[in-house]
Image (cartoon, grey):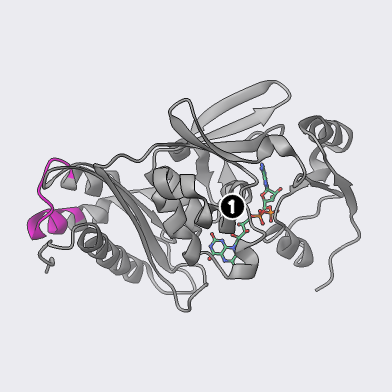
Amino acid sequence: MKWPAIGYLRASSLDDIWRARAEHGDAAQLLAGGQTLLATLAFRLSEPKVLVDITRVAALRGVRVEGGVLRIGSLTRHAELGRDPLVAQHAPLLARAVPLIAHPAIRNRGTIGGSLAYADPAAELPACVVALGARIVALSPQGERRIAAEDFFTGLLSTALTAEEVIAAVEVPLATPASRSVILEVARRSGDYAMAGLAACIGMEGARATSARLVFFGVGSGPVLAARAGAALAGRTLDAAAIAAAQAALNEDLDPPGDMHGPPEMKRHLARVLLQRAIATTHPATEAAA
Ligand SMILES: Cc1cc2nc3c(=O)[nH]c(=O)nc-3n(C[C@H](O)[C@H](O)[C@H](O)COP(=O)(O)OP(=O)(O)OC[C@H]3O[C@@H](n4cnc5c(N)ncnc54)[C@H](O)[C@@H]3O)c2cc1C
């Protein structure tokens, strides 16, 4: 389908963004990688009057360690995340997520800020930032505020960003030698959005888990932090009994809707399988759960 007639502004600075929004209000929409937005325009799912291209705004770029966290600029493209040495060292979960996102052409344009702002419930990066306990840095003419990732996603395709704010960056706690992370998903074809997926960060002390943040995607209206299942693993050796307890706890953590892939019970089954696989991947010696 063709795009509707639409205005285009290229912002070179944050001030350009604030000016465009002051002039056009809700009719102005930010354009980052365009990989979601342009499709929604073609299908008339969104109808902005002006696109404000933010890809030249230097303040939204860059990956660096600063103040004890890894700060990833919102314009960082998926492909850049996948090859950045700082990301590989300090937030390897994000690097592992990249090959699961769509196809190379989309990964070369799509940005982490666009993915978090769009908040697709089956997307990988929203689940990863919740699993990592990251913070989203939101910027407006009034200044900066930081939002815990688990509070950022507020429902289907919705976030805690206000109409005045842009995502400036994501701040990720630095990985430690005791932390292990994994992302796994089940999709019909390589590159498709997941039918169900799991991003997990597990803290270890010897053979014992000290903490487990298990975040499922494709099974709810946004990333779902499975707090009870995580608690069932914390403080325990990750043996078959611990895995079975965590799988049982998923019944309370997850309330998946049926969708084009299948009914809720199928999603629950996939979540249990993903949990078992995640533990087996991070702890290869683990006895398989029944
Ligand atoms: C065929 C196809 C398959 C895909 N498969 C997957 C997949 O498997 N997994 C996955 O996770 N994603 C997938 N995607 C989506 C892809 O990852 C997108 O790149 C991403 O979701 C949006 O990023 P973007 O930079 O392209 O954002 P855009 O499309 O430019 O913008 C998306 C939305 O975010 C807003 N926005 C953008 N940047 C900011 C910002 N800094 N602050 C505030 N708002 C902002 C825009 O105004 C718009 O509303 C797929 C896309 C396509 C076309």
* Closest to the observer, 252 or 165: 165
Specify the farthest residue to the top.
Answer: 142
- Where does the N terminus fall, quadrant-wise? bottom right
Identify the residue shown where x is 47% and y is 57%: 124
Residue 183 locus on image (x, y percent): 37, 59
Residue 124 visible? yes
Q: Say whether residue 136 is left or right of residue 201.
A: right
Residue 144 locus on image (x, y percent): 62, 24
Report the number of numbered marks.
Answer: 1
Identify the residue shown where x is 13% and y is 67%: 288
Cβ(mark 1) to ligand 1 < 8 Å? yes
Residues drawn in magenta: 234-246
132 shown above or below 183: above
Q: Say whether residue 168 is left or right of residue 81.
A: right
Q: Amino acid at mark 1?
A: Ser
Residue 8 locus on image (x, y percent): 88, 50
Q: Secondary structure at mark 1?
A: helix
Identify the residue shown where x is 75% and y is 56%: 46
Q: Quadrant of residue 4?
A: bottom right
190 shown above or below 26: below
Which residue has dot 1 on it?
115
Where's ligand 1: which quadrant? bottom right
